[in-house]
Amino acid sequence: MLKFAVAGIWICAATAGSIFFAFSAASPKGAEEAPAPYFGGLDYVKTDIVSIPVVKEGGVQGYFLARLVYTVEKEKMARLSVPAQPLIVDELYGYLYSNPDIDFAQAKTIDVSGLKAGIRDAINTKLGETLIHEVLVEQVDYLSKEDIRDNNIRRKTTGTVAPQPAPEVKPAAH
């Protein structure tokens, strides 16, 4: 009976040792695991809807509308001496106007992931350190002048007339 107990303890110790060795050999030495960005450590900053006029050929051709969300570190956000919203909107304007390759009238040619990475890199470059980790798109629209004009005409012709009061009904006299 004593032999079975010693053999059982030996099997448990060998199994535990081999599992420990397998896990320690599989993980790289000295490498710290970075926290997953979607599971904590980052804060989300949502911008208001930003309306940027698209100027081409000497006139406004339409409007780029966007609502973006930025992932930032809380500690770095707290250290900013300037509010984040104006800083982000200013850099968004600068990035869109400084890139002639971005043509919102040709929606098929827009590289959304390149646009998001460019905005992120432009803000981080301006600040001199990594504040924005990722740019998420909540809403992006482009309205041409014709779209705005058509919507305005449609709004004027369908329902801007004030409702008329119902006619007064008098009971019949007997």
Image (spheres, helix red, strand yellow):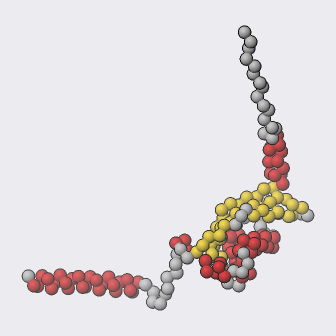
25, above or below 152, in the image: below
Residue 133, quarter of picture: bottom right
Q: Can residue 122 be seen here?
A: no
Query: Residue at coordinates 80% horizontally, 37% vertically from top-left?
Result: 162
For the C terminus, the quadrant is: top right
For the N terminus, the quadrant is: bottom left
Q: Can residue 29 be seen here?
A: yes
**Residue 128 placed where, x, y %?**
71, 84
**Residue 165 placed where, x, y %?**
78, 31
Query: Residue at coordinates 71% horizontally, 61% vertically from top-left?
Result: 140
68, above or below 20, in the image: above
Q: Nearer the viewer, residue 118 or 124?
A: 124
> Seen from this angle, which residue lies furthest bottom?
30
**Residue 114 placed where, x, y %?**
69, 71
Q: Nearer the viewer, residue 53 or 25?
A: 53
**Residue 124 placed where, x, y %?**
69, 80
Q: Left or right: 90 with respect to 31?
A: right
Query: Residue at coordinates 75% horizontally, 64% vertically from top-left?
Result: 50
Residue 168, quarter of picture: top right
Q: Left or right: 135 with respect to 158?
A: left
Total marks in image = 0
Q: Left or right: 50 with respect to 55?
A: left
> Seen from this angle, which residue lies furthest top?
174
> Seen from this angle, which residue lies furthest right?
58
Q: Nearer the viewer, residue 166 or 44?
A: 166
